[in-house]
Amino acid sequence: MRIARFIGGLLTGLIALVLAVSLFVYWFAFAADMAAAAGLGAFGYVFLWLAFGANLLLWTAIGLLRLSEDSIRAVVRPRARRRRPVRHASPERVLVGAGAPEAGAVRAGLPGGPTGSVAAPHTAGEAETAPEGADGDPGVSLAVIIPAHNEEPVIHAAIGSALSLFNRWDIYVVSDSSKDSTAEIAARTGVNVLELLTNRGKAGAIEAVIEEFSLTENYGGVLILDADTELDPGYVEGARRQLEDPTVAAVAGFVVSEWKPEERTVVGRTISAYRDRLYFMLQYLMRFGQTWRYTNTAFIVPGFASVYRSEALREIDVNPRGLVIEDFNMTFEVHHKRLGRISMNPDTKAYSQDPFTFADYYKQVSRWTLGFWQTVRRHRFWPSVFWAFLALYIAEVVLVSLVLLLTALLGVFVLVGTLGGAPFATLPFFGGAFTAVSAFLPLLAIAIGLFVPDYMLTCLMAMIRRRPSYLLYGLFFFPIRLVDAYLSLRMISKAWTTDSDGRWSSPDRVSNKG
């Protein structure tokens, strides 16, 4: 069976690679002919390469430089491996709640917590076997925060993932006024639970649990973990390895889309495959270069599974007013206040559950995009290398989104005129406009220029992941890109006219049990 899978994966990779190369050769020859016919000359070839994105090409080149340096460092100064002892519970590390009668108590109306909240810590009174590799680094001690709002289907799996790497008394679940059994499920696992009686949003929940348990005073770092995220077994070791550098203020988690096609509809599988491709490009081809020690210009530490050093976290305004999400703002705070650099390596993988429906996808991307523009509005410009590259990114996002949507509209216009024939050609203004547009941008040129470069990337992902189904789902990626482009532009004006309270509503979830 394994041999059959290996051969199948190999054949998938070869087919996808041949398809990608063939499409590239065809696309480049066709586009070069179009550029020559338009008299663009050498500038036309530059424009062709920009179809893949100036930022993508720039940071890919820088990422290759970083990879070269990392390889040289690994050879010249090999890391001495050491056995990490398991740290057992000690009296000063056992957190006791304000008057908590027993471990795991919840909805008990306990006094002493923040207004409108109930604290329910786990009391490590008896001996407990630490998981393999759990919180045993003699250097940076880590607390795990899991903010959750109505996450009953997935909270158990997230806690279980954390318990496989951490001691239970180092895990803190904050239920943000959940109406389901999120808090009760968390309490039954024996971890610390803080239940907020009023909905404060994710940032408010993070702020509340940090203050309630004085986490930045009791730990060297804090891991923020989404309730729909599961950690890779090597996550903690990778995060601690990066935190050994005292200049690192935050470790960005390396997101991997959870791929469980049997649990999804065709729409859900398409969204998951699209996200897998997007995450791969953003992380390997952009963020890897942005988090090089000589650049340090990453503008997002994803909030799904990332670590902040406590010294830096104490200086960060986690929950300012007017923002819909927290991760962009926390990242900008690190840069703006010069708290240190952001680190990212593929050894801090975590698996995230993508939206199952297009409606939830639309809401999620709307929140993310609005949060980005709101953060730009809040921090505004300050002279820095970070802002120079951020400005380049913003300019490209706006320009590409405009060009993409305009070209798509022109494509629809030419398609309607082509299919409509003579009746449409006789309409006032339509006939002349159709003749002019179709002469400059024929329907075939629009289709090839928009679809082929996008699908080439899908073929490469099918090869890398060895998933032939991506070749099918990739046919529907371009419409999703148009939605992303629309939201990128739509949320600009909204960010300057709307203040958000950060409160959230969870999307449809599927249980991760089993």
Image (tube, rainbow, N blue to C red):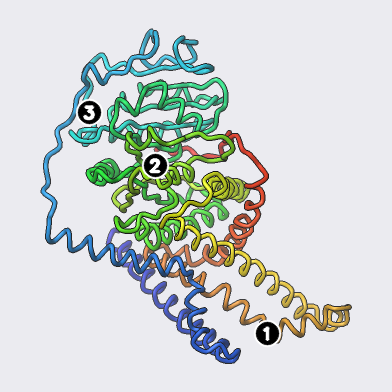
* Count of numbered badges drawn on the protein: 3
Residue that label 1 marks: 440
Q: Residue at x 53, y 54 (%)?
A: 271
Give x and y (percent) for residue 178: 54, 26
Residue that label 3 marks: 130
Q: Please name the amino acid that badge 3 sits on.
A: Ala
Q: Indicate left or right for 407 with 127 as reference.
A: right
Q: Secondary structure at mark 2?
A: strand
Give x and y (percent) for residue 352: 43, 45
Q: Indicate left or right for 251 with 76 as reference.
A: right
Give x and y (percent) for residue 404: 61, 68
Query: Who comes first in sequence, dot 1 or dot 2?
Result: 2
Q: Secondary structure at mark 1?
A: helix
Residue that label 2 marks: 305
Query: Who comes first in sequence, dot 2 or dot 3?
Result: 3
Which residue reaches farthest front?
383
